[in-house]
Image (cartoon, rainbow, N blue to C red):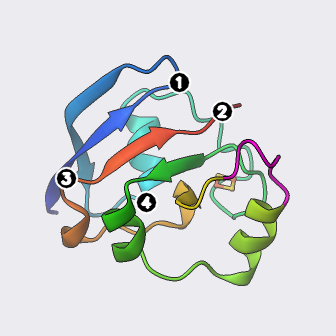
C-alpha cells in the first residue's frame, strides 16, 4: 500500500495538512477514516451526495472525468452548493498525482 498526503478543510473552516490517503481507499473512505463527518449513506455508489466536496483546480483536473451517475447527483445540488470543482469524493480513486490535493468538505 502506498500513501499520499492531502490537505483538508472541514465545514468549520479548519485546515489540516498531512492527511494520509492510502492507495486502497477512495477519497471518501480516506476522509471518513480520518474522522471527517461524511455520512456516505449510499455506501459510495454516487447516489446520496453526502460525500460532496470541493477540490482545488489542479486536483480537479487530475481526478478525471465525471461519469453520468455522478453528474446527475451533482446536478441535483442546490445552486449555491455547486461549484466548478465540486465532486463526489466516493468517485475519486487514489492517484499518486493527487498528492498535495486540497479538499474542502461540502455542506450538509
Ligand atoms: S457516498 Fe453517496 S454519493 Fe458518495
In the rendered view, would you say 36 is above or below 23? above
CA gap, disc 4 and disc 3: 15 Å
Label at residue 80: none
Which of labels 1 and 4 is toward the front?
1
Report if the CB atoms under discs 2 and 1 are less than 8 Å apart.
Answer: yes
23 relative position to 106: left or right? left
Q: Which residues are magenta?
A: 76-82
* C-alpha gap between disc 2 and disc 1: 7 Å
Ligand 1: which quarter?
Answer: bottom right
Residue placed under numbered mark 4 in the picture: 26
Count neighbours of disc 2 (C-alpha within 10 A) and say few if under 14, some if 14 to 19, many if 20 or more: few
Q: Callout 3: 10 Å neighbours few (<14), some, many (20+)?
A: some
Q: Which residue is mark 3?
A: 100
Residue placed at 82% from the left, 46% from the top? 78
Q: Quadrant of the C terminus?
A: top right
Q: Is most of the magenta stretch helix, strand or loop?
A: loop
Hey, which quadrant is residue 72 in on the image? bottom right
- On the image, the x and y values in percent for residue 69 come to 75, 75
Residue 93 horizontal/vertical position (percent): 41, 69
Q: Secondary structure at mark 2?
A: loop
Q: Is residue 14 left or right of residue 12?
A: left
Could you tell which of marks 4 and 3 lies nearer the N-terminus?
Answer: 4
Disc 1 or 4, which lies upstream in sequence?
1
* Sequence order check, earlier mark of 4 and 2: 4
**For mark 2, what is the residue?**
107
For numbered disc 3, what is the local secondary structure? loop
User: Mark 2 or mark 1: which comes first in sequence?
Assistant: 1
Q: Which residue is mark 1?
A: 11
Gap in angstroms between the C-alphas marked 1 and 4: 20 Å
Quarter-wise, where is residue 24 in the image? bottom left
Amino acid at each position: 500500500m502506498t500513501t499520499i498526503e492531502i490537505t483538508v478543510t472541514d465545514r468549520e473552516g479548519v485546515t489540516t495538512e498531512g492527511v494520509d490517503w492510502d492507495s486502497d481507499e477512495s477519497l471518501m473512505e480516506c476522509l471518513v477514516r480520518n474522522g471527517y463527518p461524511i455520512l456516505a449513506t449510499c455506501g459510495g455508489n454516487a447516489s446520496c451526495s453526502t460525500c460532496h466536496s470541493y477540490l482545488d483546480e489542479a486536483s480537479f483536473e487530475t481526478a478525471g472525468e465525471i461519469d453520468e451517475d455522478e453528474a446527475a447527483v451533482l446536478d441535483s445540488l442546490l445552486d449555491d452548493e455547486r461549484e466548478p470543482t465540486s465532486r463526489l469524493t466516493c468517485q475519486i480513486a487514489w492517484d499518486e498525482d493527487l498528492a498535495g490535493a486540497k479538499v474542502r468538505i461540502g455542506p450538509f
